[in-house]
Amino acid sequence: MQKELVRKPESTMKMGANASRRFQCRNSSRNVAVILLGWVVVSLACLTGAWGGGTPTGAVKETVDQVFVVLRDQALKDPGREMERRAKLEEIIGRRFDYAEMAKRTLAAQWRGLSPEQQQEFVALFQQFLANSYVGNVDGYSGEQVEYLKEREKGEFAEVQTKVVSPKVQIPLDYRLLQKNGEWRVYDVVIDGVSLMKNYRGQFSRIINSSSFEALLEKLRSKADLGTSS
């Protein structure tokens, strides 16, 4: 088992999600992984060589490095440049997250019954839904550390297992990736044993079954208009 412990606070970033009550209860300090989708951000700056850029872990680290460049840019912290900063973060994270795959997994069997136009709209709305969450919380880092536990790879699928550590809690955080066209793309985040995509699949299924797919779209449209994920 390969293990890396990040010791410099400035080189650690966290990602998380409010997708599970279990996670929320343990995160009483609200400092560990608040991002829905959690984009819990792992630390890169102190880590060298152990994970190459072609590995799943290397892919995650590459994206986080780019996110850090934006977060550390003092000029972009100017309130007048908030939208520019957000756009940069969305672009960087969007290159690693496979939103189409995520969206398809949240709908499961429902996905196949949709028209191409409905699928396209749902992917766009779901992407905005996630972005409103992780970009709004991505710089809430307050000293957590990250332990890299191990990487598992099977064919075109991989999982990077980490643990976010703070004085009050230790939260297991796993990234699930799918290799497409030679690149590792994140399609799920598992926070303290709870799959983010599975959690959304349950929520969305209840809305569709109790009402309709159009009702789900309307809810996502309203959240996109408000710029919220709650």
Image (cartoon, rainbow, N blue to C red):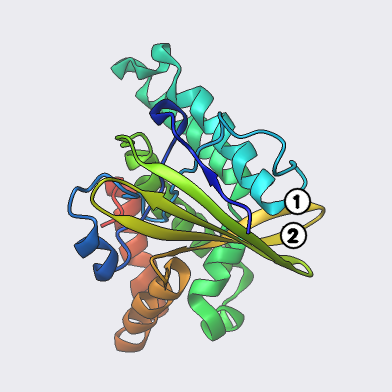
Query: Which label is found at residue 179?
Result: 2
Query: Which label is found at residue 195?
Result: none
Please state the horizontal and vertical placement of residue 4, each as a whole percent of the image: 55, 45
Please tell me in which quadrant of the rendered image residue 195 appears.
bottom left
Please state the horizontal and vertical placement of residue 171, each as a whole percent of the image: 36, 58
Q: How many numbered discs, if any?
A: 2
- Label 1: element kind: strand
Please state the horizontal and vertical placement of residue 11, each as a whole percent of the image: 47, 29
The residue positioned 56% from the left and 78% from the top of the image is 111
**Is the residue under label 1 in contact with that under label 2 (CB below 8 Å)?**
yes
Viewer-closest of 24 and 52: 52
Query: Which label is found at residue 183?
Result: 1
- Side (left or right) of 107 relative to 75: right
The residue positioned 55% from the left and 73% from the top of the image is 105
Residue 118 seen from this side:
no
Quadrant, the C terminus: bottom left
Please state the horizontal and vertical placement of residue 220, each as a whole percent of the image: 36, 61
The residue positioned 41% from the left and 17% from the top of the image is 76
Viewer-closest of 32 and 38: 32
Give the vertical position of 156 relative to 183 (above or below).
below
Viewer-closest of 24 and 129: 24
Residue type at tag 1: Glu
Please tell me in which quadrant of the rendered image residue 136 appears.
top left
Give the vertical position of 161 relative to 62 (above or below).
below
